[in-house]
């Protein structure tokens, strides 16, 4: 399997699956018992997982809405979380 295929397959991962694999990679790198070449490869995969998680979080943030209240404190409608 090529490196590009291995990195691209993370795009199908759920946020939870990506985070779990990223945590596993961090643990392996912190232990320091991985050969240099493998360390580089799993670090690159970790970067791809991190970017995927950031993309998923950004998409989730864009979907979150907050309730607007009128002066009496009654719900008036909804707006984007960031006020846009």
Image (cartoon, rainbow, N blue to C red):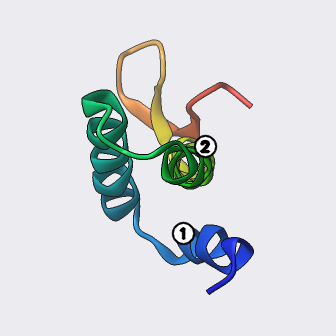
Q: Earlier in the sequence, mark 1 or mark 2?
A: 1
Query: Mark 2 and mark 1 in contact (Cβ < 8 Å)?
Result: no
Tell me which residue sits at (55%, 51%) in the image. 63
Tell me which residue sits at (45%, 71%) in the image. 13
Q: Residue 4 location, x and y as percent?
A: 73, 73
For the residues marked 1 and 2, what is the alpha-carbon distance in whole angstroms? 16 Å
- Residue 64, compared with residue 31, is above or below; it is below
- Residue 53, compared with residue 13, is above or below; it is above
The N terminus, quarter of image: bottom right
Residue pointed to by mark 2: 58
Closer-to-camera residue (11/32) = 32
Q: Is residue 6 left or right of residue 65?
A: right
Q: Which mark is residue 41?
A: none
Please tell me whether mark 1 sits on a helix, a strand or a loop.
helix
Closer-to-camera residue (27/15) = 27
Q: Residue furthest top?
A: 71
Q: Quadrant of residue 75?
A: top left
Q: Residue 53 location, x and y as percent?
A: 51, 49
Residue pointed to by mark 1: 10
């Amino acid at each position: 399997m090529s490196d590009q295929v291995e990195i691209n397959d993370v795009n199908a991962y759920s946020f939870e699956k990506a985070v779990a694999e990223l945590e596993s990679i961090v643990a392996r790198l912190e232990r320091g018992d991985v050969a240099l070449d493998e360390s580089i490869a799993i670090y690159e995969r970790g970067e791809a997982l991190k970017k995927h998680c950031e993309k998923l979080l950004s998409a989730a943030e864009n979907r979150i809405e907050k309730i607007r209240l009128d002066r009496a404190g009654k719900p008036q409608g909804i707006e984007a979380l960031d006020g846009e």
